Image (spheres, helix red, strand yellow):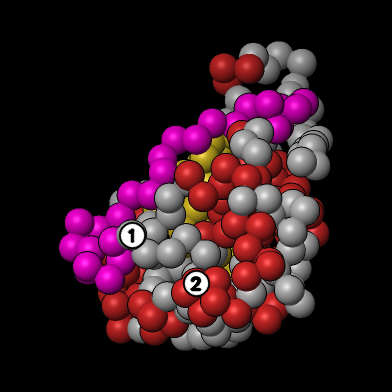
Amino acid sequence: MPELSIAGGQPTENEEPSQQHVQRLWLVRHGATAWNLEGRFMGHHDVPLSPLGRTQAHWVGRRLRLEHVTAIYSSDLQRAHETATIIAQQCSLQQSITVSSAWREISFGDWEGLTYAQIADQYKSHLDFFSDPINHPPPGGESFSHFLQRVQTAFTQLAQDVANVEVDPANWGDIVLVCHAGTIRALLCSLLGIQPERQRQLRLDHGSLSAIDFLPAAQDVSATFSLALLNVQSLARSENQKGSSSYV
């Protein structure tokens, strides 16, 4: 797995590690779509939120309203961007959402729009993706190595943005990233040294909150990461969400 290396800003001569600012990054999986509820693989297909998905996004927004959110980043796909917009409204955030295609889900190519049962029936010779994603990309889709690299590059840029903005303590605050289950898992695998073939052990439901903490001013930012929260969500979760596929 490619290594993630982030060069952060240098602490001042009199600054002790314990005095450095700990940055909280909230990781939000977008709310559910109709395709999610049907178990269809979406990837880069641009599917809007369902009514349930909007309800989930409002719950996330109300929860994050309890925090001091100063910036929101989002995938450009509308299921993520709409979730991010609802969160921004709930948090009364005046700053624009930073949108990028780099935060998209992996492209599933020929599998997009299909259910797992259909994939297992029509693509019997390509199912190694689910056990060895690095060496077996979806047919017509994106290699996992490329996917991992674009997520790492996007995060490096985000971390540098944080280090530059938060030189002034008046700018300190939490950051929110709204994207997709695969994207969040790829990021966590990179930061925590988890092998990609074990990524599905990280459960991330629709409209869920996870969080990581790190020191943006550390000499080696990648060495300071800790997983603070994983897959917290509204207790009012529909039966359709329980056990839902981690790939759609």
Q: Looking at the figure, which quarter contains the N terminus?
A: top right
Is residue 114 shown above or below 213? below
- The residue wearing badge 1 is 243
Describe residue 150's horizontal placement relative to residue 106 as left or right: right
| Residue closer to the observer: 8 or 136 | 136
225 falls in the magenta region:
yes
Q: Which residues are magenta?
A: 217-242
| Residue closer to the observer: 237 or 136 | 136
Where is residue 140 drawn, in percent x and y? 76, 77
Q: Secondary structure at mark 2?
A: helix
Is residue 134 shown above or below 49? above
> Sequence order check: which comes first, mark 1 or mark 2?
2
* Residue at the outermost left position: 236
219 falls in the magenta region:
yes
Q: Secondary structure at mark 1?
A: loop
- The part of the image, by quadrant, that contains residue 38 is bottom left
Rounded to the nearest whole Å, what is the CA distance between mark 1 and mark 2?
Answer: 14 Å
- The part of the image, by quadrant, that contains residue 49 is bottom left
Residue type highlighted by circle 2: Tyr
